Amino acid sequence: MIVCAKCGERSAGTTRFCPGCGSFLDWSGTDAEQQATAAPTAQPAAVVESARVAAPVGPSGVVTPDPIGPQQSAEPPTPPTPTSPGPPTPTSPGPPTQFGAQQPADARPLRAKAQGAEPRVLAEDDLICVGCRTRNPVTRKLCMGCGRPLDEPEPVKPPWWKWWRGGDRERKPRKPRRRGTLAAVWRWIRRVFLAILAVLAVLYGIIPGFRSSVNKEITDGRKWVERQFGTQLTPVRPTKVTATAATPGHEAVLVADNAKNTYWAAPTGATEPVLVFTFAQPVDLRRAIVRVGDPAAFQATHRPAKLHLVYSTGKTFDVPLADTPDPQTVEIGGSAGATQVEIHVVEVHRSLQGLDVAMSEIELFEQR
């Protein structure tokens, strides 16, 4: 049994914190057996002290004076013998005073562990501490293992979205709001800009015409930046041009002869027409100029509407085309390291008269 020195509460020998005041019993606790044995041993010392102070009593009941007291009081004190002054005795200097850090004081002593204490019988209604998971009797208010209040709720783990947003981190104090005319004008301009940006985003999402105009402006701006600051593009010529199909007089080589009055034509049927360009060395194609249809009779043949490029490296790229007799500049990519490219005509603009698909010219440019 352990007795708390602060409040006197008694606890079991295995308890580390007082259930009454919460004190750490390893510092403030005392064994009950030690308290019981300490009281009798202190009584003889008090009796001896009182007997020494009291005067002895004689046989006739008269108090006998202390024989030593009168003799000491009767004899006058002997005056000290004067000594002649001599030469001063040299004194050796002592060790110098040590400055700096001091050694730490001894740690506070801990009470001895209880010997032979029987383990407490666990019960079903024990209170489990949320800090150290120690089982405590239902009558306790503080944990006997760590001194934590037993009525403290267990912390709830925050949801994943709070953890992802950093909800458990300490929030930084907000900066004081700036005052003055300039700060107010700047806040107003910023709010107006954000409002305009939000309106434009809504219009871009719900109005197709506005979205197309914005995309065109962005594309034109990107092309202008590439022309101004990008790497110069140079024309690249294929060393061999073949096709899976061609009408007589309009072979595949005519699509790469740089002539404006010739064209390649192929019948449209169950299989899509395919052009194959072969290069002498690996290329990195970035741009193409395409002319579709028959230059002399534009409505006499079908015109390609979409080209599907397949490179020898395994990568592919799709190129949409407009239905116009004018040359079209299109951006292509994904061909770095390719030595051959297949041009599949997967979609066509239908003609009013002809049955074949025609393409007048394809000029390719690579990045150096």
Image: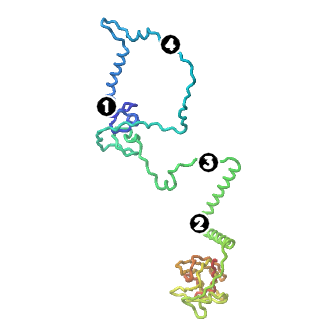
Q: Residue at x 64, y 47 (%)?
A: 177
Say which amino acid is labelled 2.
Ile
State the CA–CA distance, disc 2 to disc 4: 121 Å
| Residue assigned mark 2 | 206
Say which amino acid is labelled 4.
Pro
Q: Nearer the viewer, mark 1 or mark 3?
A: 1
Q: Residues within 10 Å of mark 1 (few under 14, many from 20)?
A: few
Residue 252, horizontal then vertical, whole percent = 59, 89
Residue nearest the observer in this picture, 93 or 142:
93
Quadrant that contains the N terminus: top left
Q: Quadrant of residue 242?
A: bottom right
Residue 29, horizontal then vertical, whole percent = 37, 34
Q: Is residue 211 left or right of residue 5?
A: right
| Residue assigned mark 3 | 175
Q: Nearer the viewer, mark 2 or mark 4?
A: 4
Q: Is residue 159 left or right of residue 365?
A: left
Quadrant that contains the C terminus: bottom right
Q: Residue furthest right?
A: 181
350 to 97, vertically: above or below? below
| Residue assigned mark 4 | 79
Say which amino acid is labelled 1.
Glu
